[in-house]
Amino acid sequence: MNLIKAGQDLFCPSGLPLEKTTHLCIASHQDDVEIMAAAPILECFGRSDKQFTAVVVSDGAGSPRSGVYADFTDEDMKKIRVQEQHKAALIGGYLAVLQLGYTSAAIKQRENKDLVNDLCEILLKTAPETVYVHNLMDKHPTHVATVVKTIKALRSLPKDKRPRRVISCEVWRGLDWLCDSDKVILDTSPHPNISGALVGVFDSQISGGKRYDLAATGRRVANATYFDSHSVDSCESMNFGLDITELIEDDDLSTDTFVMGHIEKFGRAVKQLLETVG
């Protein structure tokens, strides 16, 4: 691959070529992958016919820190977070993880063609069947910028080189509000020891003051319990996703139109229920 960003990190514990990738996650930060894409990680775990690869776009600097990490510089934190991401790849049995090292400011630059081109190179090299991305309705600006850049990269590919499916996933905003017919159920029940360890390995974030390990597990259990009020739980733990494949099938469909369509659909459903029972 001819990536533009210098200093990127490629860790390939499987020893397999990137072309063996079937499931690809493109995320903003170290630990985003493990929060948003636990289901495909677990789906591929221990399999020879399915392989998971992760892409982390940012350099990991600027995160909150306390305790033993309180006096760490941004450069220190970048090194620690790269190492933690390597540990997660080993625990989860990833084919590979690529860390591109862009700053958050660069990711959010509207006209950052370098990032789009790098993502395009990775997508062509890995040729995944399914791509997992951030939620377009997420409240973290870097997350939204990352998925927007990913959509641009996907749209730049020839039609026959694009993945079969693209799923947006929960991190800073959940997707439990979506109409049930629009939810993609991502079962995170298998191997709970593995899914717990995947997030738990990011000690710089957890000891640094953010209990992402508890929050990720709690959301998944809550999703499974509250998904259907009139039947027993179909699984013990789940994330919700939204299928956004339409955005790479129709290059003229704007992300604004796509997103607002789902928000307005939710509004109509709430209004209809209130009118029905009121």
Image: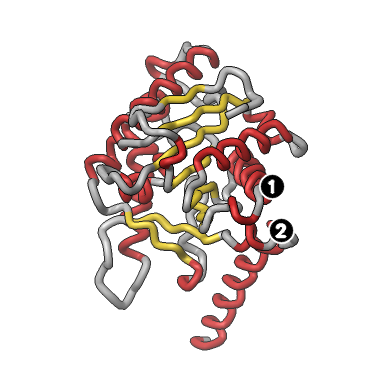
Disc 1 target residue? 156
Residue at 50% x, 64% y: name it.
177
Amino acid type of the residue that numbered disc 1 sits on in the rendered structure:
Ser
Query: x, y (%) of residue 220?
Result: 35, 53
Question: Is label 2 in a helix, a strand or a loop?
Answer: loop
Query: Which residue is painted at 37% across and 59% down in the image?
Result: 223
Tell me: residue 69, above or below residue 163: above
Residue 202 location (% of width, % of height): 37, 28
Q: Position of residue 68 (x, y in %)?
A: 38, 15
Is the residue marked by circle 2 packed among few (<14), some (14-19), or many (20+) residues within 10 Å?
A: some
Q: Which label is found at residue 36? A: none
- The crowd level at tag 1 (other Cα within 10 Å; few <14, some 14-19, many 20+) is some
Q: Quadrant of the N terminus?
A: top right
* Residue 251's disc number: 2
Q: Amino acid at mark 2?
A: Asp
Q: Nearer the viewer, residue 232 or 17?
A: 17
Mark 2 or mark 1, which has the lower sequence index?
A: 1
| Residue drawn 56% across the image and 42% down it | 123
